[in-house]
Image (cartoon, coloured by chain):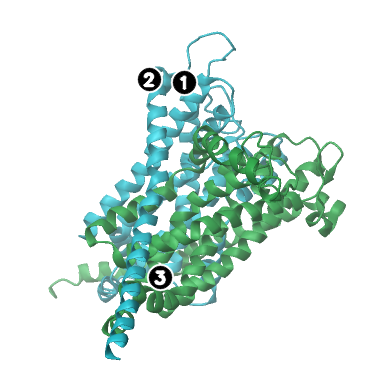
Amino acid sequence: MFDTVANAASVRYRRRVWVNRLMLGLTIGSTAVALVPLVLILSYVVRQGVGALSVGFFTETFRPVTIGVAGGAGGVLHAIVGSALIVGAALLLATPLGVLAGIYLAEYRSGPAATVIRFCTDVLSAMPSIVVGVTAYVLIVQRTRQFSGLAGSIALAVLMVPVITRTTEEILQLVPQSMREAAAALGAPRWWTTLTVVLPAALGGIATGVLLAMARAAGETAPLLVTVLGNNQLTFDIFGPMQALPLLAYRYTEQPFAVLNEQAWGAALILVVLVLGTNILVRALTRRRAG
Amino acid sequence: MIATGQPVSRSHRLRRRLRHGDVPFRLLAATFAFVVVALLVAIVGVAWDGSAAAREAFGLRFLTRTAWNPVAGEFGALPAIYGTIVSSAIALLLAAPPGIMIGIFLSDLSPARLRGPLSLMVELLAAIPSVVYGMWGIFVFIPFFRGAIAEPVSRALGDTVPFLAGPVTVGRGLLVAGIILAIMILPTIAAVSRDVLSVVPTHQREALLALGATRWEVIRHALLPYARAGIVGGMMLGLGRALGETMAATMVIGNTPRIDPSLFQPATTAASLIASQLPTTNTELHSSALVYLALVLFLITLLANSIARLLVWRVAGAAGGRR
């Protein structure tokens, strides 16, 4: 009788051990499987993109392509300039707004006003980028009857603000309370403390937040599609249609010409290097500070 | 120090002058903070205003009409809503199980040395611009999917299962979009699962281990029930991302505003319909219908995200406010 009990127990025990192995194996397998698309996509982008890179790729603009004619490929200088101007203007708009809103949330955090603002930041950060693009379209493009880089900048700025606000708030909360108290004990008023003690201590963290928001905005395509439209010429006029790297990647992908498809991959490579490079850099910097 | 009163009085004067800065500075910060609120209000207001023509013409029937014909001035949101929800549901179905498994691995099983690099790689997956996913979908995934999966499956099962009916023509369609979206939301689900699982108190694990449980039993009976709300919240956040994703969906779904039962056929999502048509609208009704659609999309994602935040907050808040 003891035998059968022991047997049944050991069968059940063996089953438990096997279930354990199976499920743990599944978690490892899932993690491995998740890395497959990352490796596939990155290696494909690099393979295709490197082929497009040349001096002309960075110094020339669009050159018309006709079927059957082998010709120079031109380059994407107009898209690089457009992206830089659009994202740069978005940065100028979003940084002061985001940082000051973050300061308000961190330093004057009590009360229902802060809750409302925090809720709105959350809603804004979860808003689909195309909805923001549509708003900029209705507000600016439809009113002025003109697609413009500036409309794109405003849309991107709206997408960046919640990211910057959130990071600023979180970083400011990490600044030790004792530093604020020390400044107060020396007789500094609160705003002076914020500006000369708290903010400098948090500057690195805020900068990384702004950098991450910028990297994310640089890769955004949808809001630009309905506001900036695209342009084959090199232009510095932010009040007119412009080209941008993600926009060019999208448009050239839909073209039947292999030359343009290749340039699309070149643009995609620039974007991926920019975005992933920023992410890894930020990670390395924050780890060094923390360690 | 007491010899001359001058420096003291000067710093005193400085202090008094600075003291006046408190109220203006607070007002300045508050103003900027309220601009954030104003932005949200403005977006909703502008979308409401911009969709006036379509709202007048169709009212709420817009949501149930199936015709989308810009030339005839017929607009209905149902095909777009159907495509949005079905492609996002496919994405969630495909991404949730592996996403949660990854979260478990990263929070509890991974060797400490691997945890950082693996987390970074999962997060990089989230950082890749969506247009790159779309390009990869067009050039690599769709040709592979059409030849290796869609055509054989639709030939074998298409006649009996309407969801898998052929003929597979362009290869772009709901299922492809769902799969690409799944890859894109996987990191969201994995990261949130990892975060809510790692705030489960250690004594919960130790209690079960002391009873002789295997590691999987600890996970199954202690960690997952404790973190369930948070994990569901992570899934809803992923769903929200899939619902609003534009470029990848636009590029691989085929942009055909009609409802076809087969997952292999081209369809459209709200976001991709807007992105592909808004820049080239000719009539006011057309653009206003697209703005109306954007408003509907915003409300759908707002709903998904509100549920998500509520669930994640409940877990993270109970465990000490870590998000």
Contact check, label 2 and label 1, Cβ < 8 Å = yes
Chain ID, mark 1? A
Q: Alpha-carbon distance for marks 1 and 3?
A: 47 Å
> Which one is nearer the viewer's eye here, A44 or A135?
A44
Contact check, label 2 and label 3, Cβ < 8 Å = no
State the image coordinates of residue A133 (x, y, percent, origin top left).
Answer: 62, 46
Q: Are marks 2 and 1 on the same chain?
A: yes
Q: Amino acid at mark 3?
A: Val
Q: Colour of chain B?
A: green
Q: Amino acid at mark 2?
A: Ser
Crowding around mark 3 (Cα neighbors within 10 Å: few <14, some 14 to 19, many 20+) is: many
State the image coordinates of residue A19 (x, y, percent, origin top left).
Answer: 36, 69
Quarter of the image with the N terminus of chain A in it: bottom left
Q: Amino acid at mark 1?
A: Gly
The residue shown at (46%, 55%) is B186
The residue shown at (78%, 35%) is B282
What residue did someone put label 3 on? Answer: B196
Tell me the tag on residue A75. 1
> Please, is residue A260 above or below residue A84 in the view?
above
Q: Alpha-carbon distance for marks 2 and 3?
A: 47 Å
Q: Secondary structure at mark 3?
A: helix
The residue shown at (38%, 75%) is B223
State the image coordinates of residue A41 (x, y, percent, origin top left).
Answer: 42, 39
